Amino acid sequence: MPVPDLFLQGIDRGWHVLDASDFDAERTFEADVIIIGTGAGGGTSAEILAQAGLKVLLVEEGTLKTSSDFKNDEAKAFAELYQEGAARATADGGIGILQGRTVGGTTTVNWTSSFRTPDQTLAHWADVHGVTGLDSASMAPWFARMEERLGVAPWAVPANANNDVIRAGCESLGWHWKVIPRNVRGCWNLGYCGTGCPTNAKQSMLVTTIPAALEKGATLIHTARAEKLVMEGDRVIGVQCRAMNDRLTLADGQRFTLRGRHVVLAGGAINSPGLLMRSGAPDPHGRLGKRTFLHPVNFNLAQYDNDINGFYGAPQSIYSDHFQWNNGTTGPIGFKLEVPPMQPSLTSALFGGHGQTNLERNQKLAQSNILIALMRDGFDERSQGGSVSLRDDGNPVLDYPLDDYIWDGARRAWLAMGEIQFAAGAKAVMPVHSQGQSSRSWAEFQQQVAGLRYAIYDVRLASAHVMGGCAMGEDPTQAVTDSMGRHHQIENLSVFDGSLFPTSIGANPQLSIYGLVSRLASSLATRLQGQA
């Protein structure tokens, strides 16, 4: 039985879905609420606001791709579904950044790991960054609401061998490990979550909240960039947009305008600050784009005698927080241990190297495991993150300096990952570094890690989590928005995405965004209904 395409069916029923590349004349669209971005923040907001009876309009820079388009094709998916064709990176190229750019945003292409915001993180935000009303007890019902809405539950299927390395190694060492909650229903366990779910099992915004909003009369305009907020005093009176070209490289198509009572900015933690900068939004205290965090990730490659086949099965189902909070909230950087999916293109990029070396590593792919460490940045005074600015062409870019604080975390993470991999039976382990070599013993690996050069480009780093840049807090001299996501200087603008976070999360951030935005959007809906 074929998988139903929810969007094709909905459009046939009359959903208001417009491709801006088809526009042939200037137009103006009006709504109660304009939502810029359709990822975790935009999608969650759209459903809540539309169900409240408000007229909602969503604009998305990426294209509409649905289950009918998802073919488990890495090359096609990375080119079509990710920011900058999956080539987004920090300004100096030191950290590769994977972010979605399609209807549903990163929720369409992420690996489904769904963690509540750690209690330590919420407490730190309150104590250090002046965030109010978001303690663990206050947030628990909002997390529960979105977990029920999106089918979030610990993965009940046995972990694939790639994930099981964490369990086996941690059990052997007496270290913490646990099963990851995933936002799926009826998952086929294919393993290609990062290329779009062809079975609609992943409960992304593409198949949940956005369809629900469209059923309530919302309008979606895709393949269009929000170029500028038009300001009049302390209010946004319009959003200037332009259609993208067919390769999504330039917004050089037809111009059009959006007008609404309220604007929700949900473009993500690089694009949201970028749009505010292009618009000349007020920033009297110089906080816009500052303190942007990544969970910088480094990697270990291990070889086993048995087949791992990390390209099959749920990409992430086991994690370890053994080193996440062991030094306290501040101090040396903590890190979460997970695995990535190991499809050939993604894995080859992580391996590094070229020519014969890369060929030989990929020939052993079926017997390989990769562990990743997500470093928890932003909690210690030595970790200030990066800053977003605009390139000459108006596109945003993140500058993220790398220093000894990060390098110390990378060193300790390599050691932790290597110890787990050897404890799980690895015959060789290699730190993913420009000079990394396979070590045949734990002692040899320790010696190698101690002797490596810790510098940009040598240590291979990546991230799929971008947070901050429009930080929330009650003090306008330190934050861009208040604790409800309301811009401190713009009366009818809210920010509802990961850019709100004053630090990184310390866990995959999707459920943090879902839970937080469900609370903030519900409050906004009540407020706008009262103004009607």
Image (spheres, rainbow, N blue to C red):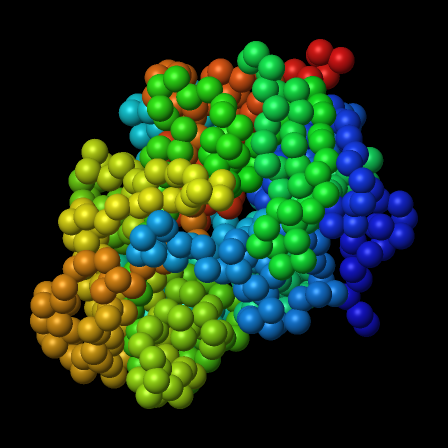
**Residue drawn 20% across the image and 73% down it:** 435
Residue 244 falls left or right of residue 216? left
Q: Is residue 197 above or below residue 213?
A: below
- 258 with respect to 293 (left or right): right
- How far across and how far down the image is residue 317, in percent? 46, 62
The answer to whether any part of residue 485 appears in the image is yes
- Viewer can see residue 484: no
519 to 91, vertically: above or below: above
Return the x and y of residue 420 as percentages of the image width and height: 26, 68
Q: Quadrant of the N terminus?
A: bottom right
| Residue at figure coordinates x 53%, y 60% from the top left | 85
Left or right for 26, reference 429: right
Q: Can you tell which quarter of the image residue 530 is in?
A: top right
Q: What quarter of the picture does the C terminus occupy? A: top right
Which residue corresponds to the image point at 23% horizontal and 46% vertical from the top-left? 333
Percent of width and height locating residue 13: 90, 48
Q: Residue at x 24, y 69 (%)?
A: 433
**Is 180 left or right of 188, judged from the image as shown?**
left
The quarter holding residue 429 reads bottom left
Q: Nearer the viewer, residue 155 or 387?
A: 387
| Relative vertical location of residue 216 with respect to residue 174 in this rendering, above or below | above
